[in-house]
Image: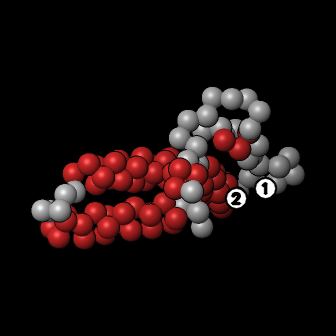
Amino acid sequence: KMAEYFNDPPIFYFGEKLECFRPWVDLTLMKLPENAKDSAMTKILLFVATCCSYGIELVIPLLRRLATLTMFSLVVMATFTITEENLVEWGGQVITWAFYLAFAKAGGEL
């Protein structure tokens, strides 16, 4: 189960069939309709909508992947560095950082 959670979103996908896993998004469809007014407010709103779309489709998955890699590194590091002698010193910190990273990754799913 942990491996499934770590691989959501997939760290690397090079295929062509699963469109939702591609790391790039074609947002050229976001343009003014033919009958829309070319007012400054419409252009500003379209720019804000485009920035939000890029953030949702590109930035948030990238941050979730970064949190996944960091969490995986933390699990590997904790497995091999925590011993009985340093459990009290490092155990709480590792668990705290794991919670922070899991919260950061889950925050991208909203």
Left or right placement of residue 35 versus residue 90 in this view: right
Closest to the observer, 57 or 41: 57
Left or right placement of residue 95 versus residue 86 in this view: right
Give the CA separation, mark 1 to mark 2: 7 Å
**Amino acid residing under circle 1:** Lys
| Rendered location of residue 14, percent (x, y) | 63, 29
Q: How is the image coloured?
A: secondary structure
Closest to the observer, 103 or 96: 96
Of labels 1 and 2, earlier in sequence is 1
Q: Residue at x 70, y 58 (%)?
A: 42
The part of the image, by quadrant, that contains residue 99 is bottom left
| Residue under numbered circle 2 | 42
Q: Are marks 1 and 2 in contact (CB under 8 Å)?
A: yes
Q: How many marks?
A: 2
Determine whether the residue tagged by mark 1 lies in a helix, strand or loop.
loop
Q: Residue at x 61, y 34 (%)?
A: 13
Query: Do we see residue 40 in this rendering?
Result: no
Left or right placement of residue 82 versus residue 63 in this view: left
Left or right placement of residue 26 versus residue 48 in this view: right
Q: Residue at x 83, y 49 (%)?
A: 33
Query: Do we see residue 109 in this rendering?
Result: yes
| Residue under numbered circle 1 | 37
**Amino acid residing under circle 2:** Thr
Q: Of all residues shown, which one is farthest toward the front?
A: 84
In the displayed structure, 63 sits above or below 11; it is below
In the displayed structure, 37 sits above or below 106; it is above
Determine whether the residue tagged by mark 2 lies in a helix, strand or loop.
helix
Q: Residue at x 28, y 63 (%)?
A: 94
Position of the C terminus, as image quadrant, is bottom right
| Rendered location of residue 71, percent (x, y) | 39, 54
Badge 1, how many Cα within 10 Å: few under 14, some, many 20+? few
The part of the image, by quadrant, that contains residue 1 is bottom right
